[in-house]
Image (cartoon, rainbow, N blue to C red):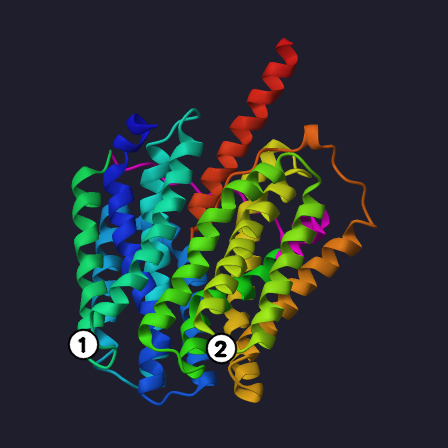
Amino acid sequence: MFKVLGSVWALLLGMTLIMIGNGMQATLMGVRGALEGFGTLQLSVITSAYFLGFLVGSRVTPDLIRRVGHVRVFAALGSFISAGLIAFPILTDPYSWTAIRVILGFCLSGVYVTAESWLNNAADNTTRGKILSAYMIAQTAGIIAAQGLMNLGDASGFFLFVVPSILVSLSFGPILLSITPTPAFETDKRMTLHRLFESSPLASVGMLILGGIFAAQFGMASVYGAEAGLNVAQISGFVASIFAGAMVFQVPIGWLSDRMDRRVLILGVSAVGAVSTGAGASLGVDFETLLVLGFVMGGMASPLYSLFIAYTNDFLEVEDMAAASGGLVFVYGMGAIVGPMVTGQLMDAVGAHGFWLLLAGLFTLIAVYAAWRMTRRPSVPVDETGAYLGITPTASPVALAAAQEWYVDTAEGADDQSFEA
């Protein structure tokens, strides 16, 4: 394992620094926005703008890479990110922030696509799963670390915006100075949304709803905290607990995923998510309680992403798995764009606890739909299902495509073993 990590340590370090910067600016939006007098609905639009840019960037960046190459795209987008982070405290109006967030979402998506291309190029059939797992841990750890840095300065000043800008700028050093030869960039054939839905209605609908859940968690948790009267330390602690849960629960849920009907597990995970978020709406604002609820909520939401991918693959031929990734990312992205705006409208109408009410409703929708789908289709025998690999919703389509390559390698390896036996 140490030998594998030694070959990609610079990429992992650079992406961790980028995620620290991204995690800081996501939390800062809610805290500083409240100080500037932005309304909840305005902040929800600003949040959705990031995911709009991210979705567009994931589809446009491959063309940019083919035109000018990985290094130029990576360096250019990184410069825009650094400049955008500095611009927030200078242009303090909702329209400017919305535009900056679209740009940041676009650029960060492009940076992820480029870096993950290098990461995947450094992997082979025997190391891809380990490298992807390490990458997902680095991403989540970066977001958690970002919350600790939120307590180093005053959100009303410039310092907390300068820090992520510096970290993002520094991240390009280890990446650009240690990259392997530029990988060839190929675009997988795409699967139509209609065919994706026919292959797995549960995963298609579930991904759409999950996009709204994750975007609300990632972008609106700080808005909720500010409206609920939490201080900066409490808000950052609450956000950190969400991503700590996402990291901790990946392993046990992944273990269960390979040993039981995945629909039952999806139902159970969604039900736990619904209970925890429903409790958040009814228990009031108590910081210690919020930490527990955030930990459970995040621990249920993030593994669902991997569960839906694995469940989709159970109904696909190996040659179609990579093609399905584009459709899954697009469906998820549409949900992520809409989710924060609906959250903001509900919070504007009923108050801060609208944050929890929406999440509880979305988790419940997944659970109910999973229960209904169990009556419409027989389960896949456990010994015929593919393996689970923890992929976080913050990854780009390139990481998802790399995960699909790992699924294919695993499936083909299992077939070869069965044939030899």
Numbered label attached to residue 285: 2
Indicate left or right for 45 with 356 as reference: left
Front residue of 359 and 45: 359
Residue, disc 1? 158
**Residue 284 image position (x, y, % from top left):** 54, 78
Work out which quarter of the rendered image holds the C terminus and state it.
top right
**Residue 228 image position (x, y, % from top left):** 45, 81
What residue is shown at x 54% (from left), y 71% (from top)?
A: 338
Front residue of 41 and 24: 24
What range of the chain is rendered magenta?
Answer: 181-206
Work out which quarter of the rendered image holds the N terminus and state it.
top left
Are the residues flagged by discs 2 and 1 in contact, CB closer than 8 Å?
no
Q: Is residue 308 visible?
A: yes
**Residue 160 image position (x, y, % from top left):** 22, 71
Observer-side mark, 2 or 1, equals 2
Indicate left or right for 402 with 321 as reference: left
Going from N to C along the chain, the mark reached first, 2 or 1, is: 1
Q: Secondary structure at mark 2?
A: loop
Amino acid residing under circle 1: Phe
What residue is shown at x 60% (from left), y 70% (from top)?
A: 279
Front residue of 277 and 134: 277
